[in-house]
C-alpha cells in the first residue's frame, strides 16, 4: 500500500539556521516512516547551497528525495513549509507551516496572514508561541479608514524544539591534532566563548548585542593582573575575507576607545563543521559560554554549547529559556527596550516592537564572579548538560513531531486497488454462435 505523500518545501541544502532545522525535520519525517517524503529545496538569502554531502549517509537519504522540478504526479496529502511565515503556501490537502519565528515582541502583519493560510503552525519555543498568539492588528477600510476587524493568528500553534544531534554534540576530550595546534595560539588558560553573528546596527543595537558584549568584557577585565580571554566565533552576513576584515575593524574600533591594559580577544571566522564546533565548545581553554543576545526564537548554538557541561551565561528572556532554566543556567537580568530602526532589515521592522537589553553593569559583575568562583558554577552546568542531552535530542524531537502529526493530520483516503473481472478470451478464428430466443407469431 502506498504511503501518503509529504512534500517538504524548505532550504535543506543551505548553510543556515533554517537549513539545519529543515534537514533535521526531514530526517525525523523519514524516521517516522509515515509518509513518502519528497523535498523541494529553496534558497535562503545568499547563503551557500552546499550543505548536503552525497557521501554522508545522513545527507544521502535527503538527496535521493530531492525533486528536480516542482512537480508531483498528484496533490500531496501533506505539505510542510519551512520558511518565514509570509511565504507560507497551501500546496497539500493538509498544510503545516514551520518557522523559527521572531526575536522581538512583534512581527509583520503578513506573517499572521501567512500562518492563517495553513491548517496549523509549528514554532521552536514557548516564547515564540506566546508572542505569535498575542499579536494583533486592526484591519481598516482603505477608503474610509474605519476599523473593520482584527487580524490575529487563528490557527493552532504547537511548540517543537530544535533537537540537537547528540552523536556530534557531546562532552569530549578528544580533539584533532590540527585543532590542538591552532588552540596553542590562545595564550589564556581561561576563556569565555561567544558564538553568534555580528549583524547590522550601531553599538548596542545589533540583534546579538555582540558589540556591547565585547565592550563590557574589555571594561570588566582591563588592568587586572590575571585576565581571562574572550574567543569570538563570529561573522557578518558572509564568511568572506572582506567580512573577516570588517569584523576585525569593529573589534579594533571598540578596543581603541577603552584605555588601559586590555584582555586578549581571539577571533574565529569561517565555515566550521558540527564536529569542529563541538571541539571548540569542549576545549579545556574554553571555560564558559556567553551571549548578550537581544532575543532568540530558539538559540540553537546555546543548546549545543550547554551539552559541553560548561556554564552558559545568557539573558533571562526569549526562546533559549526553554532549555536554559533559572538555577542551572546563569541568566542575566535586564529590561525590554524598543527595537531601533536599522537594527533589523526594514521589512522586519515594526514600530514599537521590543526586545531585551541586559543590565550591562550587572552582567559585568556576573562575568567577574564566574571567573573568580568558577567551581561554584560547574556542578549546575554539568546537571544542565546531562538534562539537555536527553530532553532536547533529535530522537526526542522526532518523537514529539510524531505526536503532533498524529494529533492534527487527518487520515487520508487510502488508494484502493481496482480489481477488474476476469474476461474470457475470444477465439477470433471460430465465429461464436449466438442463440436467439424463440419468437411467438402474432
Image (spheres, grey):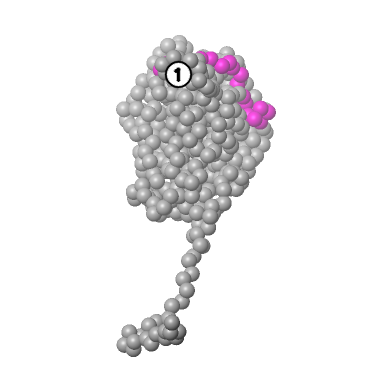
Residue ID at (55%, 19%): 356
Near mark 1 (Cα within 10 A), the count class, few <14, some 14-19 or many ≥20, is few
- The x, y position of residue 15, in whole percent, is 40, 39
Is residue 51 rendered to the left or right of residue 303? left
Along the viewing direction, whichever of 90 and 175 lies nearer the viewer: 90
Residue ID at (45%, 12%): 258
- The x, y position of residue 438, in whole percent, is 44, 86
- The x, y position of residue 207, in whole percent, is 47, 22
Q: What stretch is highlighted in magenta?
A: 324-342
Along the viewing direction, whichever of 416 and 314 lies nearer the viewer: 416
Whether residue 11 is visible to the viewer of this picture, yes or no, is yes
Along the viewing direction, whichever of 51 and 351 lies nearer the viewer: 351
Name the quadrant of the C terminus.
bottom left
Q: In this view, does 172 lie above or below 135?
A: below
Residue 89, quarter of picture: top left
Residue ID at (52%, 22%): 149
Whether residue 99 is in magenta: the answer is no
Q: In this view, does 213 lie above or below 39?
A: above
Along the viewing direction, whichever of 124 and 412 lies nearer the viewer: 412
Q: Residue furthest bottom?
A: 430
Amino acid at each position: 500500500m502506498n504511503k501518503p505523500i509529504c512534500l517538504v518545501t524548505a532550504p535543506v541544502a543551505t548553510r543556515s539556521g533554517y537549513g539545519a532545522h529543515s534537514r533535521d525535520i526531514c530526517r525525523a519525517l523519514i524516521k517516522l516512516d509515515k509518509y513518502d517524503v519528497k523535498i523541494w529545496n529553496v534558497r535562503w538569502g545568499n547563503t551557500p547551497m552546499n550543505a548536503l554531502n552525497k557521501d554522508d549517509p545522513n545527507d544521502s537519504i535527503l538527496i535521493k528525495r530531492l525533486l528536480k522540478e516542482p512537480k508531483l504526479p498528484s496533490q500531496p496529502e501533506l505539505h510542510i513549509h519551512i520558511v518565514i511565515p509570509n511565504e507560507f503556501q497551501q500546496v497539500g490537502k493538509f498544510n503545516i507551516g514551520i518557522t523559527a519565528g521572531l526575536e522581538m515582541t512583534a512581527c509583520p502583519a503578513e506573517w499572521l496572514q501567512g500562518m492563517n493560510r495553513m491548517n496549523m503552525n509549528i514554532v521552536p519555543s514557548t516564547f515564540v508561541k506566546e508572542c505569535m498568539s498575542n499579536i494583533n492588528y486592526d484591519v481598516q477600510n482603505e477608503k474610509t479608514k474605519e476599523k473593520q476587524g482584527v487580524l490575529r493568528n487563528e490557527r493552532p500553534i504547537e511548540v517543537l524544539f530544535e533537537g540537537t544531534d547528540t552523536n556530534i554534540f557531546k562532552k569530549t576530550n578528544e580533539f584533532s591534532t590540527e585543532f590542538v595546534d591552532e588552540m596553542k595560539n590562545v595564550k589564556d588558560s581561561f576563556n569565555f566563548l561567544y558564538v553568534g553573528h555580528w549583524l547590522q546596527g550601531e553599538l548596542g543595537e545589533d540583534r546579538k548585542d555582540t558589540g556591547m558584549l565585547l565592550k563590557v568584557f574589555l571594561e570588566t577585565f582591563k588592568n587586572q593582573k590575571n585576565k581571562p580571554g574572550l574567543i569570538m566565533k563570529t561573522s557578518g552576513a558572509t564568511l568572506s575575507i572582506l567580512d573577516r576584515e570588517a569584523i576585525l575593524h569593529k573589534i579594533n574600533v571598540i578596543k581603541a576607545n577603552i584605555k588601559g591594559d586590555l584582555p586578549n580577544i581571539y577571533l574565529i571566522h569561517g565555515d566550521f563543521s558540527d564536529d569542529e564546533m563541538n571541539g571548540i565548545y569542549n576545549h579545556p581553554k574554553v571555560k564558559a559560554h556567553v551571549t548578550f543576545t537581544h532575543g532568540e526564537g530558539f538559540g540553537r548554538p546555546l543548546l549545543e554549547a550547554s551539552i559541553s557541561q560548561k556554564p552558559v551565561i545568557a539573558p533571562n528572556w526569549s526562546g533559549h529559556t526553554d532549555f536554559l532554566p533559572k538555577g542551572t543556567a546563569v541568566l542575566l537580568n535586564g529590561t525590554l527596550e524598543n527595537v531601533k530602526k536599522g537594527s533589523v532589515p526594514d521589512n522586519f521592522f515594526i514600530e514599537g516592537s521590543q526586545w531585551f537589553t541586559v543590565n550591562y553593569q550587572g552582567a559585568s559583575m556576573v562575568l567577574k564572579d564566574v571567573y573568580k568562583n568558577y567551581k561554584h558554577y560547574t556542578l549546575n552546568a554539568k546537571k544542565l548538560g546531562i538534562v539537555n542531552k536527553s530532553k532536547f535530542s533529535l530522537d526526542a524531537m522526532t518523537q514529539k513531531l510524531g505526536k503532533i502529526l498524529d494529533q492534527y493530520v487527518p487520515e487520508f483516503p487510502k488508494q484502493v486497488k481496482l480489481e477488474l473481472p476476469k474476461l474470457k478470451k475470444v477465439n477470433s478464428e471460430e465465429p461464436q454462435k449466438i442463440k436467439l430466443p424463440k419468437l411467438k407469431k402474432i
